[in-house]
Image: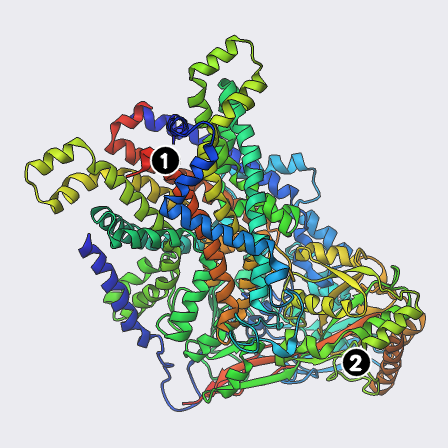
Amino acid sequence: MSSAAAKETAKALPKDHPLAELFYQIRHNRSASIGLFIILFFILVALLDPLIAPHDPITQDISMRKTAPLTAGYVLGSDDLGRDILSRIIYGSRISMLIGVVAVGIAILFGSLIGIVSAYYGGVVDTVIMRLIDIMLAFPFIILTIIIVSIMGPSLFNAMVAIGISQVPQYARLVRASVLAEKENDYVTAERSLGTGDLELMFRSILPNCLAPVSVQATLGIGSAILESAALSFLGLGAQPPTPEWGLMISDGKEFITNAWWIVTMPGIATLLAVLGFNLLGDGLRDILDPRLKD
Amino acid sequence: MFRFILKRLALLFPTVFGVVTLVFFMIALTPGDPARVMLGERASEKQLTELRQQLGLDKPLAQQYGLYLKRIVKLDFGRSIRSGQKVADDIRTYFPATIELTIFAMIIASLLGIWIGVLSATHKNTWIDVGSMMGALVGVSMPIFWLALVMIMIFSVGLDLFPTGSRMNVRFFFQPHTNFYLIDTFPYLFKGHPEYFLSALHHLVLPSVCLATIPLAIIARTTRSSLLEVLKQDYIKTVRSAGVKERRVIFRYALRNALLPVITVIGLQFGYLLSGAVLTETIFAWPGIGKWLYTAIQARDYPAVQGGIIVISTSFILINLLVDLLYSLINPKIRLS
Amino acid sequence: MKKALMLLLVLLMGGSFLFASGDKESNDKASSSKEGGVLVFARSNDAVGLDPGTEDDGESFYPIRHIYEGLVAFKPGTTEPEPRLAESWEVSADGLTYTFHLRSGVKFTDGTPMNADAVVYSFERQFKEDHPAYDQGPWKYWGYMSMSDIVDSVVALDDMTVQMNLQKVEAPLLNNLSMEFAVIVSPTASAKYGDDFKNNPVGTGPYKMVSWTKGDSIVLEKNADYWGENIFLDRIIFKVIPDATARWLALQKGEVDIIDLPSPEDLDAIRADANVDLVSGAGLNVGYLAMNTAKKPFDNKLVRQAINYAINKDDIIKGVYGDSGQAAKNPIPPTMWGYNDDIVPYEYNPAKARELLAKAGYPNGFSTTLWAMPVVRPYNPNAKKMAEVMQEQLKAVGITAEIVSYEWGTYLDKTDNGEHDMALLGWGGDNGDPDNFLWVLLSEPAAIPPAGNIAFWKNAEFTALCKEAKETADLATRAELYKKAQVIFHEECPWVPVAHSTDYVAMKKNVKGFVMSPLARREFYHCYLED
């Protein structure tokens, strides 16, 4: 996607209320508004977890293990240690939201840094950096995260870092492409002739104009980070018990598919919904910020 | 054209070399001692030292790297620490299982995906379009390992339609040669044992449908937007105004050009699945390379991890190259950029 | 496009349904006699290798037991050695010389004769460093059993007589020789294949290997020239199905005949199935929580006792072992001789636990770490889950325990060096002798890093009792000594002995002749399929 298009949109917005305008557009875009609604719902749940969860997510009651949904006060049933699945999903939403944001944050931070340096200086620097990025992209993605976690040890935080690192190349490429396009603009030449320093030019003038494509990618990226962290936890490489992480809950339930279907099913639906929310919003944002793709 | 190919091939080497080096140092950084994993609860210090010596783990890192490079250049991946088998032999056993699964999944994803994409584009903004695109978005958001478990729960446990995993009925006494079971069992179709081939096919269904979910969704979305783009172009308007039937417009004139970006997507997805199948393989007990590699990482089986990653990465790079070449064959303009 | 799609669907569905019936194909047995048939055994993991000297995992031993035989072997269903390739033997009066008389006319499946040279070869390759095959090691079990400190030499007296000379009296020697590492291999094949011998096994057993698809299945075929009798099956297939529930589904659908280690969660369904038999045996193992007595506050006996009172084993067994566990009170399993049944276990009593903690100077409890293994072991089906349950129970008496886990190799390394506070681990018996538990896991010498005694518990009295028992020949005296040692263990409690897991196998009703082994082996020697 080109940033020129994004700038066109930016020009179309009233200068004093760009965010309000964006919000207006989101409300009038079907998929963006549904997505935003789902995400806000999960964020609300994540913030209010102790207030709305009917049970403690960790407390066990072995005599009530594998209680079916809608019985004995367990709305979504209980797991194999008698913990309330609904409460665990509620507490899990905080973890999943956090993972998504932190992992993508790491990826954006390092990705944009690499991308902007590469594009701004060009030449040998650019070639070397892009070669390295190519190597990272050629490396099998999930295997890369598995190895990074193996190096750092399995934990939720390390899983976030691993996912963040493995997403760095996407942002590096994206930012590089938009900076390259941006560099050619008159205002850059003008500012440079006025003696603006490299750093200021890079981060104050150019980077903000590349944020549109990054924001689309970031929204989609949060969704995939949630999926990946669930996958890592499923393999035992992410969150550790008794953390109510969705992937870990699915993994716990796989033993019981013949006799307690809800243990596996419920956290999966939660994951699907949350990721769907981010994908809907990301799709909508792309339509809004890059009108060329609108049909 | 020839020079373009040569140039691309030449660029391949630094990337592969980078992967080879990255693999080595990442693995050197990984804590955990393969000797310890092998010997388990009962190991004595003397046994551990002996085994480390035998594996060459006591040498300085630079020397290990040198020896490693020398081996790789000769395409010798060494022997797996765990199984004692040649890593190359292991790869020859497990990689075909993954490739077979992936190809099957990509066939399902491409055929269904393109069909849904075309349907969506031609019925733009109807319930078919909205429904399919919503479905595609759900597909992209799907935790695959969860889908796999749910499918087993419904189709194997509940309805008893498909086996829960593995590649073929165990009772069949059958020696694979290529390890592509559909190829290996094909001759038996005419030798009075059609059940071999059918069994292999039957076992492929659930895992490949599962694996196809995400590529299917992406292909459907790409096809739709690409076709809509093409349909806006002037030459389509010309063809339409000449009174050509709409079906013919779509399939004869529009789709061919619209499929260009779809081919890229198919190639990319195919490459991702080669390693991305690890979860699906784990759940369906599919003896593929992803699962094999994952176990090797867990066991700190250095030679196996190195060999596995190098082979997967190189295939990934080659597939990308192939897609680019194909693309430039169809659309020569690309070579200029 | 549509056509292609339809074709694909038709092919898929048609193929599948046609075939759904084909999957339930019956065994191709010729007559109604016991002879013939294919037995499919589904288990959780593949063998690592099939060289009996270099492997140490149960999954490798399953097929190894069918391919090879030792001089002696455990009588089916027991831990008592009985003659196998040795027809008889004599022990010298000082207990240092064993003379074995070999069975004549036995051939390896490569056609070479089994004789004294083969026996000497099979042992010497494991400990003589100048032996041509020594480099094919590590000879894991030879090392684990400290055989180099026991055996001095193995000599061929004539073609059919072998003498084993010992450095010291070893009461459980014949038990050791009944283990897998001590079976007799074909020297010709071992020399021919070298490092690849583990993929091309050749022994004298009732079955020989015909194919091995790594990670998937091993096919054994009947050895037509086998010297023994009552071998019925044409083929045995060892099939890998890692997931326990998937194994049960495969048995239900008739895809396999016997399954190993069904999930505890499925036991009720298995019992209810009229076409399936569930066979169980007490496992010769123990899963325990070791408290690092070299560290505060676990150097205090009262703290250790408090933790024993705080742990509710019933809940752990219900939540982690399901039906397949039995609460432990001693460090050795109840089926083993020398087990002290007079010990009264610590009951679940959080109030008492808090009281003891207060007495020890921790009225408000303390914070610590609880280590959990990352892998499934026979003695502990799910260590992380066990840690979760314990964490809750400890919280109730004021102890905050953080769950820690490492990759398996690192985990063993760190616990062996005493980096943990509390750690879950366990042990499965090798030869049925209490020495194999008490000495290896709790003696003073075992507390030197890398330690087998990961409680780092050093009790001179306990160690002296075990040492005496080790060097006594009389079984009754040994049993008494071990019983006394268990009393000390109970009082000092360096562990919380958690559970002994029960060993389960489920099979179709028409599978006959299977005997459960207390050593968690799977032997199908005399199995047959009934019509």
User: Label 1: chain?
Assistant: B
Residue shown at 44%/22% (left/top)?
A182
How far is disc 2 from disc 1 in space, using C-alphas?
Answer: 73 Å
- Residue topped by disc 2: C91
Label 1, secondary structure: give it.
helix
Picture residue at 65% right of the left edge, 42% below the top: B29
The amino acid pointed to by label 1 is Leu
- Whether residue B186 is visible here, answered yes or no, is yes
Quadrant (top left, top right, bottom left, bottom right) of the N terminus of chain B = top left
Q: Nearer the viewer, residue B131 or B73?
A: B131
Same-chain check, marks 2 and 1: no
Vertical side of C93 occupied by B283: above or below: above
Residue C237 placed where, x, y %? Answer: 47, 73
- Which residue is disc 1 drawn over? B321
> Is B285 placed left or right of B259 in the picture?
right
Return the x and y of residue C213 as percentages of the image width and height.
46, 62
- Residue C261 visible in the picture: no
Locate residue C351: give its quadrant.
Answer: bottom right
